Amino acid sequence: MPVQRLDHVNIRTHDLEATQHFYVDVIGLRVGDRPPFNFPGLWLYDDNVAVIHVTGLDSSDPCDDNSGSIDHVAFRVDGLAAMRERVARLQVDAQECIVPRNGDLQIFLRDPNGVKIELTFAASEVLPREAVNQGSR
């Protein structure tokens, strides 16, 4: 499972507008294309790379686990079959999701400190029937 690169950081916020203002007007990133997830958010780009994903929160949402502003750190990786085998062998709790529109597969797990880690695999590693059977995040 070679890690290709750090892919993005996901920030959770109750104020999308202020977060967008900060990262666009202060830092100099730009808002760009984002898959049609079923929750609010935006992706912020440096050049052509979405380096920060922002997830909008509603304080009344039962899924708001209040885990803090940094939701997860994502790595772009390859070797899906080997990673699935490793996760099963080591009995690591993991959740898989398919990204809407592009079909990439995400595996979410937590490090010993509780930090959520996303491992993103290219859609080309996903079997067609898996993409149909997986929910999206």
Image (tube, rainbow, N blue to C red):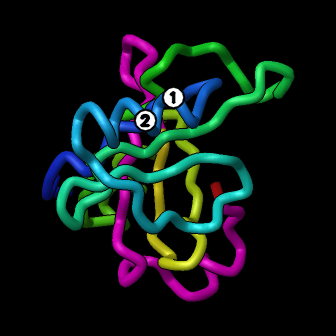
Whether residue 114 appears in magenta in the rendering, the answer is yes
Q: Is residue 136 or residue 8 the one in the foreground?
A: 8
Q: Which mark is residue 21?
A: 2
Q: Position of residue 11 (x, y in %)?
A: 45, 31
Label 2 to label 1, Cα distance in Å? 5 Å
User: Quick one: SS at disc 1?
Assistant: helix
Q: Position of residue 51 (x, y in %)?
A: 28, 48
- Quarter occupied by residue 10: top left
Figure check: 5 above or below 24: below
The amino acid sitting under disc 2 is His
Q: Which residue is label 1 attached to?
A: 18
The amino acid sitting under disc 1 is Ala
Q: Is residue 74 or residue 79 the one in the foreground?
A: 74
Q: Position of residue 52 (x, y in %)?
A: 35, 43
Figure check: 101 above or below 115: below
Disc 1 crowd, CA 10 A, few/some/many (<14, 14-19, 20+) = few
Instruction: Say which residue appears at 45% left-offset and 70% top-offset.
Output: 104
Q: Position of residue 19 (x, y in %)?
A: 47, 31
Instruction: Say which residue appears at 56% left-offset and 78% top-offset.
Output: 101
Whether residue 129 appears in magenta in the rendering, the answer is yes
On-image quarter of the N terminus:
bottom left
User: Quick one: SS at disc 2?
Assistant: helix
Which span of residues is magenta-colored?
Answer: 109-136
Q: Are marks 2 and 1 in contact (CB under 8 Å)?
A: yes
Q: Which mark is residue 51?
A: none
Instruction: Say which residue appears at 27% left-offset and 47% top-offset.
Output: 29
Disc 2 crowd, CA 10 A, few/some/many (<14, 14-19, 20+) = some
Instruction: Say which residue appears at 50% left-offset and 83% top-offset.
Output: 127
Figure check: 72 above or below 45: above
29 relative position to 43: left or right: left
On-image quarter of the C terminus:
bottom right
